[in-house]
Image (cartoon, helix red, strand yellow):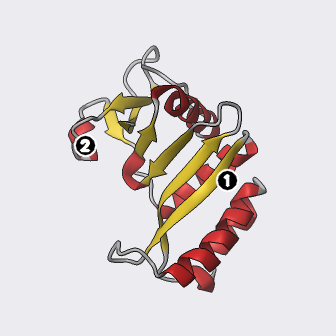
Amino acid sequence: MAVMQLVVRDSDAASAGLAALPNPLQKSPESFDDASTHALLLGSNDLVEIGTQLCALGFKVKSVDLVDRYFVSTDDETSEGIGEALIGFMSRGDVDSARRFHESSLMDGIYVAQLKLRNTASGGVIALAQDGILMGDEANSRQVAQGLAEVMHLRLVE
């Protein structure tokens, strides 16, 4: 499984856009920053919104990893109840409903650390995590990156 870092390039018009750069050594996201490239630091809200939009593009959320503010995994009961409800909202592709649930008192102090998504066209599974970390095989990761670029209104660049 390849590990990639999502970055936004904002240099000249030819290379501006979203890129998924190989990160086999799992360096920190900030190590990808330079004058024209910035790591895409996704948070819990971003994962919910982007995951919901990817569902509207044909992906399916397999699971959500929920954590507390100390980044400790939530207990099984919370993960199952809240996680299943959140997946339900996301699977409908309705960003407003998913956002409202994520921001509700039910999820107070609970955050999404990672999503696992299935590409319904190919059957491949990828993981999209906070700080813009993308894990999966290259073909499926590229399709997710293309979907991310589309929902973020960016071009996918190399």
Residue at point 40% right, 74% down?
A: 73
Mark carried by residue 92: none
Taking 151 as reference, is 157 above or below it? above
Percent x, y of residue 99: 65, 66
Residue 19 vs residue 89: left or right? left
Taking 14 as reference, is 100 above or below it? below
Question: Dot 1 lies on which element?
Answer: helix
Residue designated by label 1: 52
- Mark 1 is on which residue type? Thr
Q: Quadrant of residue 82?
A: bottom right
Residue 61 vs residue 6: left or right? right
Percent x, y of residue 144: 56, 36
Q: Quadrant of residue 118?
A: top right
Q: Are marks 1 and 2 in contact (CB under 8 Å)?
A: no
Residue at point 54% right, 75% down?
A: 79
Percent x, y of residue 59: 68, 43
Percent x, y of residue 70: 32, 77
Residue 60 vs residue 32: left or right? right
Question: Dot 2 lies on which element?
Answer: loop
In front here: 6 or 36? 6
Residue designated by label 2: 26
Q: Quadrant of residue 16?
A: top left
Residue 33 can be seen, yes or no? no
Q: Quadrant of the N terminus?
A: top left
In front here: 95 or 66? 66
* Mark 1: few/some/many CA within 10 Å (<14, 14-19, 20+): many
- Mark 2 is on which residue type? Gln
In front here: 61 or 99? 61
